[in-house]
Amino acid sequence: MARGALPGFYADDACCDAYNPPMGNGPLRWRRILMEWLFLLAAVAVGVPAAAWLAQDSLIFFPQHASSTAHLPGHAAPLTVTAADGTRLTGWISRASATPAPVLIYFGGNAEEVSFTLADPRWPRDWSIVALNYRGYGTSEGKPGARELTADALSIYDTLAAQEGIDGNRIVVFGRSLGTALAAHVAAERPVAGAILVSPYDSLVAVGNHHYPWLPVSLLLRHRFDAEADAIRCRTPMLTIVAERDTIIPVGRSRALYDAWAGPKSWQVVPATDHNMLSGTSDFWTGVTDFLAQR
């Protein structure tokens, strides 16, 4: 029996050493465990933002494709605008009942194929309505991005302003959700008679911070859509329409953009509705038509 063994138990010295490691190894073991956890936390801290940076295009843009145009009204005609880099943007112009006509340029949401909006019968017939799909949406060429869409918005305006049958003094820009930043940019860079902003935001960074407070959004976001920087330069009249229960664009972000707008402005809240149902209400269309009637 080895030294120190209890009566009735047999053990050799090597076995005892194996099952009774020196006390000095304890701190080393805990240090190793701590380092493993630190490495894991570092991997999460780096990996999650990296994944968000790589996936941001798919989190912001949801291209929709046009399968049919049977729903469009008979007075809607195809329209193609060539962007500054040669990319072809396709959409339609729903011409007014008389010419020269005022024109409304529509910039849609991030998951919108614009033909369905153009087909809505509640647009006033004394206005020509123009809607082109973003790059990668509908049959438009290219890939969407903040820089590209912002430049495209100016190309669309410039193309229309030069067309016959358009009253260049009565061009109104209309932006919905993502498109409000594009409408604000055009209003800051070109002469327009007014701007209608539906569910606007001051910047996509601010919206991202609201939805992802645990991410360094300002460091990661490539598509910033800084509408506030344009709003402070805008002198044209503007109507803001927001949904009372909007959970996608917080009303506070819409208010920040509204407060930054330098020109005359009015604020309309549609009660008991949300982001996606806003344009289905009569209050929404009353606000739109009343604003256009004053232009």
Image (cartoon, rainbow, N blue to C red):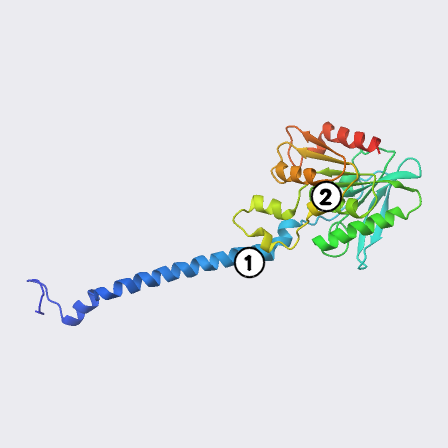
Q: Residue at x 68, y 38 (%)?
A: 259
On screen, residue 138 above or below 27: above
Q: Between 28 and 70, which is closer to the camera in this rendering? A: 28
Q: Amino acid at mark 2?
A: Ala
Whether residue 258 is visible to the viewer of this picture, yes or no, is yes
The answer to which of 232 and 222 lies nearer the viewer is 232
Left or right, 66 with respect to 80, comes to left
Q: Earlier in the sequence, mark 2 or mark 1?
A: 1
Q: Specify the amino acid type for callout 1.
A: Ala
User: How many marks on residues?
Assistant: 2
Residue 51: image x %, image y %? 56, 57
Does 184 sit above or below residue 23?
Answer: above
Q: Quadrant of residue 109?
A: top right
Mark 1: which secondary structure?
helix
Horizontal and vertical percent for residue 160?
87, 47
* Rendered view: 268 above or below 52: above
Secondary element type, mark 2 = helix
